[in-house]
Image: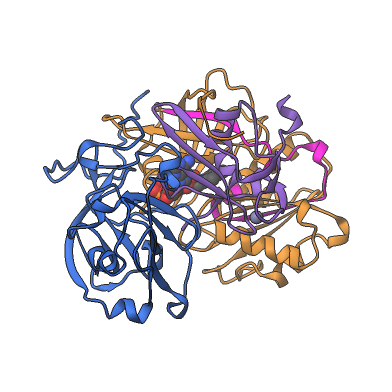
Amino acid sequence: MAVTRGFQGRRSTAESSQLPPGQYLTRDFPVLSAGPTPYTPLESWDFTVRGAVDTPVTWSWEEFRSLPAESFTVDIHCVTKWSKLDTSWRGVSVDALLGAASPRAEYVTAFCDGGYTTNLPVADLRGGQAWVVFEYDGNPLPPVHGGPARLLVPHLYFWKSAKWVRGLEIRADDEPGFWEMYGYHNYGDPWREQRYQGD
Amino acid sequence: MTRYDGNAIAGTLEDIFGGDLTTAACVCGQCGQSGVVAEIAIYFGGPGIVARCPYCDHVLLVITRHSGMYCVDVTGFAQLSTPSALA
Amino acid sequence: MARTAIPGRLTWQQATVVETRFDTPQVKSIALTVPGWSGHRAGQHVDVRLTAPDGYQAERSYSIASAPEDGYVVLSVERLDDGEVSPFLVDELRTGDELELRGPVGGYFVWDEPLGGPLFLVAGGSGLAPLRAMMRHHRATRSEVPVRALCSARSLEALLYREELMELAACDPFDISITLTRVQPSAWRGYRRRIDSDLLAEVAWPPADRSLTYICGPTAFVETAAAGLVGLGHDPARIRTERFGGTGVQP
Ligand SMILES: Cc1cc2nc3c(=O)[nH]c(=O)nc-3n(C[C@H](O)[C@H](O)[C@H](O)COP(=O)(O)OP(=O)(O)OC[C@H]3O[C@@H](n4cnc5c(N)ncnc54)[C@H](O)[C@@H]3O)c2cc1C
Ligand SMILES: [Zn+2]
């Protein structure tokens, strides 16, 4: 590996104790996605919690938007090594969504428009750690960043924060999602640098 | 999301398969359309490279890389023929 | 075949910059020597890899703008102001610097004599680079395949290889059309609009001639041109495309 004279890359070299190992700061908001941006009209958008639950529940956009929402500011960390600090969002706590359905199992597959999936433990979506967000920085979440709504689980690598999310499937088995199937870590804790299987 | 085409991964494919794959004929496993690898849709915006069918967006190919090893999934193709030049 | 783990096989080579030159205010051509270069086919590209002192790497593809017959491997890089790699290549890189690359790669977006013609080459902005390699190769081999080319640029200043195109236009097998989409000199006699199907109908070979078409440039440009030609009745199997990605401004 030969160093290229004068090349730094588009990274801020600023050190920060807020950064997990191996991450660098970015000021813009890189688009993380692996396909065309789906445009789902709000009339046909809904959000479902299904699978191993007491009561499967589906909310229309209007119903979803009438659920209690909260505004919050968090740091996000992408496995492609950029981190963005102090991002502000507004959305519905996943606690409220799970509460309505009463899960009977330990794992979740988040499913999305465009076919993307990611897997998480139910426990990581509880306790005020995860949201389904519909606003970023005071504006409706733009489609390139997952709008109308995306999952946001800031304590895990950002691929777990599924864009264009349409629901959560509760499962007894931990089924790997899209990137997890291709060698990315099943859990993805940035502070333990769990990028790939075996990290 | 910026879309490229199969030409953009010619180098990566040659690194993996040991020859040019952009002229290889392929058939989509979902809609059955056929074409060449050079014309499929490529997205670099994720943690890995994702190739999709230009007609139906079906995922044809996923390539991830970790410490020098590639992980390659070509199961999205119904058919992927090796071009004769590779022989 | 399902999922498998395999090590890479293509090797990265050290190239040395021997000369750089601004072709337009945004595009710099970089001439390289690559020890042990195996030669290339007109239209192929290389992957360039940059490495920062802390090990961070970025990879991008650049077409080879020179013909196989030319002495150097030439890349023509357009600066995208908010880009990561292109501003470095255009503004930082200088004669004597070393650059890692692998290639030549790509066996699809290439032209040589046995593929025949007539040729129709459609370029948007820096998408002219691989097509210029084809035209230089054509000329170097004294090919008699008739060539029509349509180059789209924002302004005359932004048009790549301007003088070379003028020279080529004066040669017999070449018929070169230029469209300037934003700014035109007052006496401009070429086209003055973005590529659309009327413009293509005027400039392209009639579909019955079964021309072999190469379209290259920003993704949106390529899709417009390809769809336009198919709409006019050209056989999609005779149209080869190469997308450079989403480069903001439409050439
Ligand atoms: C086959 C091919 C030939 C090209 N030839 C030329 C040319 O001759 N002249 C020219 O000016 N441009 C060419 N390009 C475009 C060039 O590769 C760069 O996309 C362009 O220079 C912008 O890069 P940037 O880093 O400045 O911009 P950025 O905005 O930083 O990067 C552009 C985007 O490229 C993506 N990207 C592209 N390739 C890769 C890759 N291999 N791995 C990971 N991410 C990638 C990044 O995700 C990023 O979003 C070519 C592209 C292709 C696919
Ligand atoms: Zn398909």
Chain C drawn colour: orange
For the point 30% across and 42% down, the residue is A187
Q: Dividing the picture into quarters, in which one does residue A90 lie?
A: bottom left
State which quarter of the image contains the N terminus of chain C.
top right
The chain shown in purple is which?
A: B
Q: Residue furthest left?
A: A17
Q: Position of residue A133 (x, y in %)?
A: 29, 67
Chain A drawn colour: blue
For the point 30% across and 45% down, the residue is A10
Along the line of sight, which residue is nearer the eye, C132 or A162?
A162
Q: Report if residue C62 lies within the magenta region.
A: no
Q: Residue furthest right?
A: C208
State which quarter of the image contains the C terminus of chain C.
bottom right
Left/right of residue B52 with respect to residue A192 in the rendered view: right
| Residue C59 vertical position relative to residue C27 in the rendered view, above or below | above
Along the line of sight, which residue is nearer the eye, A71 or C230?
A71
Is any part of residue B64 visible from this angle?
yes
| Residue A27 vertical position relative to residue C194 in the rendered view, above or below | above
Q: Start and end of the magenta stretch?
A: C99-128
Q: Position of residue B71 (x, y in %)?
A: 49, 33
Q: Residue furthest top?
A: C36
Number of numbered discs on residues: 0
Left/right of residue C139 with respect to residue C38 in the rendered view: right
For the point 60% across and 28% down, the residue is B17
Is any part of residue C79 visible from this angle?
no
Along the line of sight, which residue is nearer the eye, C226 or C129?
C226
Left/right of residue C170 with respect to residue B63 in the rendered view: right
Q: Report if residue C118 lies within the magenta region.
A: yes
Q: Dividing the picture into quarters, in which one does residue C93 lie?
A: top left
